[in-house]
Image: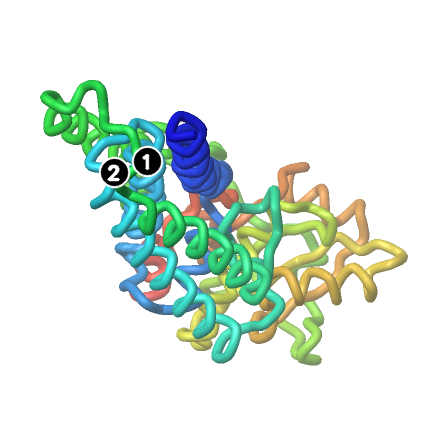
Amino acid sequence: MEFILKNKFTALRILIGIVFILSAILKLSPIAPFENLLLKLDIVPWNLVPFAARGIIGFEFLLGFMLVANVYIIHSLRVTLFTLIGFSLFLGYLHVFVSSQDNCGCFGEIVELNPIQSIIKNCLLILVVLYVLRNKTVLPSNMFSKFQLYIATLIIVGSFAMPFIFNIPILAGEEGNYVIKPGMKISHPSMKSVVFNTKDTVDVTQNKHVLCFASLTCSTCKFAISKLESIHKKHPEFAISIIFLDVPQRDSLLSEVRIKTGLQTIPYTFVPAEDFFKTSHNKLPFIMFVDNGQIKNLRNYSDLYIGDIFTFFEQ
């Protein structure tokens, strides 16, 4: 009977650990939606968002590996319990004050959960952790108990290093994925008189503009739009605009994009396919930093460093 109990609690311990490890892995690839969530919440300075996102993912790796490896198991379970409670309180805040329908990002983009669904998931995990802690006397000891400190050190270092190794944050001054050719300009006639949804007609070849060329069905475009929307909400003076590829079913698709990205404040327009692809060079998303027609910077969703936008408009 004791053997069965020990194995049952071992299985539960490993299960909880695997949940945390999976959560970390799914947040890491792609990491942009999780960074966008932190940016939207405005809980850390924008320049620290890439590091905070990877730090949280590293912490999840840490808890998961500590539980699976049975290292300092009682302390690990207690930290896991308080972490789940803390995450649940945060999700409650997200539900009440931000959005009740947003994907909370707990399992990245693969498994979408709204805040309430994720709170229910956390409550189930909390019950399992409490059950295991209540029966801590029958938990099997670590066969490498003499080396727990060394194992824990390796796990800590490895857990926090992995997010930075497998998804290196973009820093100021780094080259983008797109190449800017000498003298590259935005000169297509359609860009000299762009009519946005705000009814404003703008010549985007004049003055400074950040233009995001996007498709309504492109998932990575949505990541870029979400990040740009978070910036524009706080800095409406920045001339950020979205150029959508025009499609027949654009109204229904636009509604989905609004829900997914929180698009509210950025002006947008629709451009026919021929003009769109001539200007965007068949790249999606294609984010141009334009200064009086001259293209100063080109980015997509993964290499869009927020600081570049501030530097561009404040120079």
Q: Amino acid at mark 2?
A: Ile
Query: Which of the 4 image quadrants contains residue 231?
Result: bottom left
Disc 2 target residue:
73
Q: Is residue 251 left or right of residue 197?
A: right
Look at the image and name its color scheme.
rainbow
Disc 1 target residue:
67
Horizontal and vertical percent position of residue 71: 23, 31
Relative height, residue 104 to residue 100 (above, below): above
**Mark 1 and 2 residues: CB-CB less than 8 Å, in contact?**
yes
In percent of the image, x 57 and y 66: which residue is there? 116
Per the image, label 2 sits on a secondary structure element best described as helix
Q: Judge whether residue 181 can be spotted in this image.
A: no
State the mark number for residue 312: none
Quadrant placement of the N terminus: top left
Q: Compare residues 308 and 249 and report the one nearer the observer.
A: 249
Query: Which of the 4 image quadrants contains residue 196?
Result: bottom right
In percent of the image, x 18 and y 24: which residue is there? 151
Instruction: Categorize mark 2 by other alpha carbons within 10 Å: few (<14), some (14-19), many (20+).
Output: many
